[in-house]
Image (tube, rainbow, N blue to C red):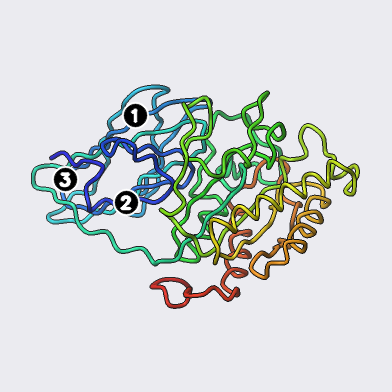
Amino acid sequence: MQIRPDHEKLSYTGRIDWSNPAEPVFIYPCTSVRMRFTGDYLKVHVRNRRAYWDNYLGCILDGRQFSFRLPGEGSAVWELPLEQGEDKEHDVLLFKRQDACHEVSFLGIELDEGGALLDVPGKSGRRIEVYGDSVSAGEVSEAVAYTGSEDPEHQGEYSNSWYSYAWMTARKLDAEIHDIAQGGIALLDGTGWFHEPEYIGMESAWDKIRYSPDLGEPLDWKFEHYQPQVVIVAIGQNDSHPADYMKEDRHGEKAKRWIRHYKAFLGKLREKYPDAWIVCCTTLLRHDRAWDLSIGQAVQEMEDEKITQYLFRRNGEGTPGHLRIPEAEEMAEELSAYINNLAIEGWEEENGGN
């Protein structure tokens, strides 16, 4: 029995390209589709487009997590290994493990003739959104054996958004998440590491569904489709490439320009989300504290009581490569506690939460 992607019992989260309802496209990490069903088998149909690295699709089946290696280009079908049993119910979450190193189209599922889709539990009503870089995306998070060390050689196999501090924080808060995160991205175009040598910054990506030229024409996001109560801005670490001008002179012209642009970005977010709390931070990934001081200055100059800065206890002192699962858990524990102490209007009235 073929189930189309637009079936009403499938539950989606994330900025998704719905231009073709028969082929929704997942681009950002943490983008997902959840389903509950009965039956003896489930087949998943997808199509991949690769920009770089090897690409993987994440899956949590009845509490067990694994991943599928995607083809570089073209379609793939997987049959999931179900535990058999009369009228046994199954719960599956398919999710995007990686950033815009690829995009994947979800083409639907197949159930056996005796199978049926069931209702998925409703969302809590709590919503967060994260703007960040590779740490927010969970890049290289599964390389736990390299905690405290530089990254191992890899082709994307260690990256898993499920283990990003961003998604961990959302789960601790029982909140839905949109994770606008891209490895290597800085605030400004022309800086950072993403899409070198023509570097693309968050200023160009933040309001898009598709933002990488390697995957096609840019596609704008309609902000009315998702209104978070909490927005996390974790930008300011890749900005030191190719020159760490903030470390060299925090009061110089380049530093002042960056602060102006950072404030302008916060202003754009405030325009889209008039009532949201905006939490500005960096991460445990090593960086010069001058960036945190400049973020603090920008937050203060915004003069908005709902725009705050959070500094982690080990801010900038973690693994020199990317953060591993234990460090992401550490961040999520702190950040979720901080958010829970904010006076978020309507937060306690929602269905979920701690």
Callout 3 environment at 10 Å: few (<14), some (14 to 19), or many (20+)? many
- Residue appearing at x 61%, y 42% in the figure: 134
Tell which circle, 1 or 3, labels the residue nearer the N-terminal end.
Answer: 3
- Which residue is pictured at 54% across the width and 46% down the height? 180
Residues at marks 1 and 3, CA–CA distance in whole angstroms: 24 Å
Disc 2 crowd rating (10 Å Cα; few below 14, some 14-19, many 20+) is: some
Tell me the CA gap for discs 2 and 3. 18 Å
Separation of marks 1 and 2 at Cα, in angstroms: 18 Å
Instruction: Determine the secondary structure under disc 3.
Output: loop
Identify the residue shown where x is 36% and y is 45%: 94
Quadrant for the N terminus, please: top left
- Could you tell me which secondary element the residue under label 2 belongs to? strand
The three-letter code of the residue at mark 2 reads Arg
Image coordinates for residue 118, horizontal then vertical, percent? 19, 56
Q: Determine the residue positioned at 71% across, 40% down.
A: 238
Nearer-the-camera pick, 111 or 25: 25
For label 3, the residue is 40
Which of the two discs, 2 and 3, sits closer to the camera?
A: 2
Identify the residue under disc 1.
47
Q: How many marks?
A: 3
In the image shown, does 206 or 96 lie closer to the viewer?
A: 206
Q: Earlier in the sequence, mark 2 or mark 3?
A: 2
Report the disc number at residue 287. none
**Residue 66 on image: x %, y %:** 40, 42
- Disc 1 on helix, strand or loop? strand
Q: Which residue is mark 2?
A: 34
Up the image or down, 218 lies above or below 237; here it is above
Residue type at mark 3 is Asp
